[in-house]
């Protein structure tokens, strides 16, 4: 895989065109953390081109929708938003750009060409670095641009970046996915796995530490299949974790998403040995039924998953687990669903992200027989939710009276007078405290639990 350095030619060209004109942009992040990290790069490029960010869509000169297509409601959301901005386009000539995963779907781009002709720029997941060139073509030649690559792109280094958070930095370590879980659209819209070079990742994290970042989140669709090039002895994910753990200034390391099939012993040992790695591990289950897992192409059985979860808990006693579950996959029988409930009961997850199966165009599961009726999917979802919420409340109690090291992230969104942060198991903690604590790690005693958050006091 070739790694290319970004060329700033078009960033400078756009900058020359709009300099001094007080142009503003707004970017909507509609997907996962990888999508969020892409938005940060889009913001970085927009800023270097001379745009300033606004939160007010009515004063934006450039609107960018960074789309997602993991489930059906994502499409409804985008087309709803596009309907809303049509008026802005007509009144102010606002530039409308679409990018992200949904733009890699042919039927969507067709629909945009036919029914949303006022969209100016469309670029995909492999052409994000061409956004300045596309914008330049539009501004200088009034060319509408559709810039999508079907084949996998290269790995680009050196894109400008404007980060959302001052404490926690997202660092993509690999792009794409090779797993082809049968329900999932990601391999079709993000292409095959491509790894960043360890030296590039380490350089980025070292400079983040120098800027004052305390926490990094390593991102990829399947982070534990990461392959290094041998730089400083880094050949796999476990090696990378150990190297990141040595970077001075970084105090918390987390990663999403690992795949159970690649959760090898060396990864478990690296987590055990590295004290900076977060004590919540995401172990996406998807289903508890071996039969359903086989048809999902997940490459593990119920028993293998349970053995892995037990091994992790045994080796790293202070670790807790979170997971993703899909209910209503085609052919899921009541007994299959009960297997899922059984795994949830046995593992006792700290956090469960629950999804109702959603048909994705072009995936194998779309064509499978025995699609589950909506009412059954919803009924199962509700049963799972009830179990998870009961477990969560029970589980929260174990925090009461404990003293936790909390990275104070900022003011609470719901109460200006309170601060908020997270435990090393990702539980939200709300507490009273002085603003100077923001960005620092504080010792906090947990005093009560409230389902979605814990309340604490400076210890
Ligand atoms: N690479 C990650 C998943 C990324 S997508 C992993 O393997 O864990 C995030 C989650 O969305 C998945 O874990 C899955 O639970 C859910 N998901 C993916 N496709 C879906 C679909 N078609 N319908 C419902 N949920 C889906
Ligand atoms: Fe989708 Fe499976 Fe790849 Fe995750 S591992 S992105 S669920 S195909
Ligand atoms: Fe993420 Fe959605 Fe794409 S979940 S990888 S933005 S399809």
Image (cartoon, helix red, strand yellow):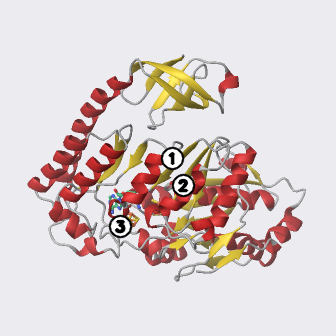
Image: 351 above or below 25: above
Q: Residue at x 25, y 56 (%)?
A: 305
Q: Secondary structure at mark 1?
A: loop
* Residue in the foreground of this view, choosing between 205 and 32: 205
Q: Residue at x 50, y 70 (%)?
A: 227
Q: Residue at x 24, y 75 (%)?
A: 367
Image: 318 above or below 36: above
Marks 1 and 2: in contact by CB < 8 Å?
Answer: yes
Q: Which residue is identified by label 3?
A: 184
Of all residues shown, which one is farthest toward the bottom? 151
Which sits earlier in the primary sequence, circle 3 or circle 2?
Answer: 3
Which sits earlier in the primary sequence, circle 2 or circle 1?
Answer: 2
Distance Cα–Cα, label 2 vs label 1: 7 Å
Q: Which residue is identified by label 1?
A: 274
- Whether label 3 lies within 8 Å of ligand 2 gets the answer yes
Judge whether residue 340 can be spotted in this image. yes
**Foreground mark, 1 or 3?**
1
Q: Is residue 205 left or right of residue 389?
A: right
Distance Cα–Cα, label 1 vs label 3: 32 Å
Residue 113: x percent and y percent? 54, 76
């Amino acid at each position: 895989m070739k790694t290319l350095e970004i060329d700033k030619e078009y960033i400078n060209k756009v900058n020359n065109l709009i300099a001094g004109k007080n142009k503003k942009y707004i970017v909507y992040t509609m997907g996962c953390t990888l999508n969020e990290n892409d938005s940060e790069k889009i913001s970085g490029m927009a800023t270097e081109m001379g745009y300033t960010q606004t939160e007010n869509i009515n004063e934006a000169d450039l609107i960018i929708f960074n789309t997602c297509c993991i489930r059906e409601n994502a499409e409804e959301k985008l087309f709803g938003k596009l309907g809303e901005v049509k008026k802005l386009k007509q009144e102010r000539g606002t530039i409308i750009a679409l990018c992200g995963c949904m733009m890699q779907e042919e039927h969507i781009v067709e629909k945009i060409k036919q029914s949303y002709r006022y969209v100016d720029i469309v670029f995909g997941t492999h052409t994000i670095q061409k956004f300045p060139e596309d914008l330049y073509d539009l501004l200088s030649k009034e060319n509408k641009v559709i810039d999508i690559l079907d084949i996998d792109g290269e790995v680009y280094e050196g894109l400008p970046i404007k980060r959302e958070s001052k404490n926690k930095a997202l660092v993509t370590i690999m792009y794409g996915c090779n797993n082809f879980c049968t329900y999932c659209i990601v391999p079709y819209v993000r292409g095959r796995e491509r790894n960043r070079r360890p030296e590039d990742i380490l350089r980025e994290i070292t400079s983040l530490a120098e800027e004052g970042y305390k926490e990094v989140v390593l991102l990829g669709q399947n982070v534990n299949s990461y392959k290094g090039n041998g730089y400083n002895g880094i050949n796999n994910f476990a090696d990378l974790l150990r190297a990141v753990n040595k970077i001075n200034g970084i105090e918390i390391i987390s990663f999403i998403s690992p795949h159970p099939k690649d959760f090898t012993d060396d990864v478990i040992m690296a987590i055990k040995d590295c004290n900076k790695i977060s004590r919540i591990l995401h172990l996406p289950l998807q289903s508890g039924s071996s039969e359903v897992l086989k048809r999902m192409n997940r490459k593990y059985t119920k028993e293998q998953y349970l053995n892995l979860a037990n091994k992790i808990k045994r080796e790293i006693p202070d670790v807790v687990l979170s997971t993703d579950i899909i209910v209503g996959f085609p052919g899921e029988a009541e007994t299959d669903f009960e297997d899922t409930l059984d795994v949830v009961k046995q593992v006792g997850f700290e956090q469960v992200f629950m999804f109702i199966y959603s048909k994705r165009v072009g995936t194998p599961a779309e064509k499978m027989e025995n699609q589950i009726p909506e009412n059954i999917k919803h009924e199962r979802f509700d049963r799972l939710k009830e179990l998870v919420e009961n477990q969560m409340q029970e589980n929260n109690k174990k925090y009461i009276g404990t003293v936790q090291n909390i990275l104070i992230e900022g003011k609470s969104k719901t109460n200006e007078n309170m601060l908020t942060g997270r435990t090393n198991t990702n539980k939200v903690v709300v507490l009273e405290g002085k603003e100077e604590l923001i960005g620092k790690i504080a010792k906090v005693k947990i005093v009560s639990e409230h389902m979605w958050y814990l309340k604490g006091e400076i210890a």
